[in-house]
Image (tube, helix red, strand yellow):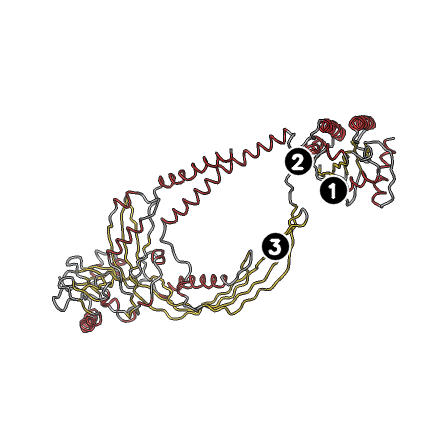
Amino acid sequence: MATQVTNYQCPSCTGPLHFGGASGKLECAYCGSAFEVAVIEQMYAGKEQAAAAAGTDPQWDLAMAGEEWGAEEAAHMRAYTCPSCGAQLICDDTTAATSCPYCNNPTVVPGQFSGTLRPDFVIPFRLDKNAAKAALKQHYKGKRFLPKSFSSDNRIAEIKGIYVPFWLFDGASNGDIRYRGTISHTHTEGNQRVTVTEHYHVARSGSASFEKVPVDGSTKMPDAHMDAIEPYDYSELAPFSSAYLPGFVADKYDVAADTCCQRANERIRASTRSALAATVTGYASLTPESEAITIDNGGVSYALLPVWMLNTKWNGKDFLFAMNGQTGKLIGDLPVDWRKFFAWFAGISVPLMLLLGIILF
Amino acid sequence: MKKIIATFIVMLSLSMLMALPASAAEFDLVADGAGVLSDEEYWELNELAWEITERYQCEVSVLVIDDMGEDDAYEFARFVYQDYGYGYGKDKSGLMLFISMAERDCALVAHGYGNRAFTDHGKDALLERAVLPLLAKDNYYAAFLAYYNKAAEYLDIAEGGAPFDTGTDEVYRQQAAKSGFWVRLAVVILVPLAIAGLVCFVFLRQMKTAVPQRAADHYIPAGGFVLTQSSDAFLFRTETRTTIEEKKSGGTSIDSSGFSGTRKKF
């Protein structure tokens, strides 16, 4: 268990460094200095090794703590010491980067991303907290059923920039689908309407390659939210460095790749099906008769992708929003004011009824 | 006597089926080849038939047979009417109610002045309102009596200048107005509800944006999909025919042989 954590300190003033999404550099909020990620990485390479070595020497005896904490709870807890203020940080076993609650210094837990757990890629945050707040306000706009008090009264209870662990699946699919297609023509003979229907056997086979289909590997993150903020621009994928993490929360995965691959396979299968169906045109009706889609699994990468998570509370209920930290796409379910709903329903239907009544009677 | 006529009608039907040359023959206007009437009913109806025929100079007849085989009731009635001397005067004016018992088919054919006096709507109304309900109960005498009474009523109306038709049929007008009212009311209520429901559904969908992805289309690189086989093989052809319901706006549809008519089951 790692007990040593790292926070990147400014070489000029020893203030804490944060990753700046706009500049792509590590910035010091105190003296205003900015440093290339590679420079700080090099500087801290020795420190990280030391931290990793220290991580092999546990200082926390979970067996002793078992009297107060349940075995299950203890198994998922980790304790670290903040290198800035010396406070003990209690985190769960998937936390890889966080902030010290005492001195607010951004903190990285190097052991979480060591060895086979080390991510292959990271997409750095491009958008900051203010952009997330602005996007949330924009999200409220044009929502006709949104309760007025939701946007006016509610405050963002929590906003966190999180590097969410994703598995990126490469693969290829081969599909063979048979359909029954019909084309109908109608003409009139005397007082009869004659419909001639031609039946066809339609066969389509094809292959598709897929690059980096993402599936989030964190049970903390709701799948629907993580899916809905896709896609990410993979051209900005960078080799992983913990230097991107300061200032944000980062988790390591807690759902293994072989569990996540099922969701990736389902999505690959669905896309193959729709790609083949898109090649069949000109039929009035098309009914699939048989389908065989095989997936050749390729490589799997482990990446941290940037997400802003925003929590709001309204009427005692929590509302969770997620924003793609790279593209700014924000999603999240909003409450419905059913009085507004019925007002709109009546507002549309009643005048239309009156108008039609005047026309038809 | 009735039996003789009945036998004649059966022979007449057979001769028609065998395409024997027809000859003009005089016979009573009610011909019961299936024995559905008593002698007394038979004579009473014939007397009524002649009375109406003479008064309006339009022959109103009834022909009942046991079995017409594979034929169509309207075609059969038209054939008999044409080839066996039915009709009054030079233009062979008349109306014939034909019934085939085995198939429980009936047809009403008109010719000459009968086409003007008995419009398509008039023939339908006569059959559906006066005759079919009684035929369905196998009450043949009452059905034929109703037929003659209604025929006399329509002929009387036609003598006034305008035949019984959609425009002069109060029942039809009331029914049309009633059904039209309900259709319009349904349109007035349902169409706005459907439009409002659709608009509100679209607005409601905007409130829910956290939806899982079902496909991975974004992750197929350019040129990443290759179609390796594409075949469309014709299998067979099917044909369905539906009769186009003629919109009734009144009047009489007369075929090339000068007949108009309708057919029903009872």
Badge 2 local density, few (<14 within 10 Å), some, or many (20+)? some
Identified by mark 3, the residue type is His
Element at badge 2?
loop
Q: CA distance from mark 1 to mark 2?
A: 16 Å
Q: Which residue is mark 2?
A: B250
Observer-side mark, 2 or 3, equals 2
Can I make out residue A129 in this image?
A: yes
Q: Which chain letter matches label 1?
A: B
Q: Are marks 1 and 2 on the same chain?
A: yes
Asked if labels 2 and 1 touch by Cβ distance under 8 angstroms, the answer is no
Residue placed most toward the observer, B175 or A304: B175
Residue ID at (79%, 32%):
B61
Query: Please, which chain is the residue tagged with disc 3 on?
Result: A
Taking depth in this image into account, of B81 and A86 the one nearest to the observer is: B81
Q: Are marks 1 and 3 in contact (CB under 8 Å)?
A: no
Q: Within 10 angstroms of label 3, few (less than 14), some, or many (20 or more) residues? A: few
Quarter-of-image position of residue A161? bottom left
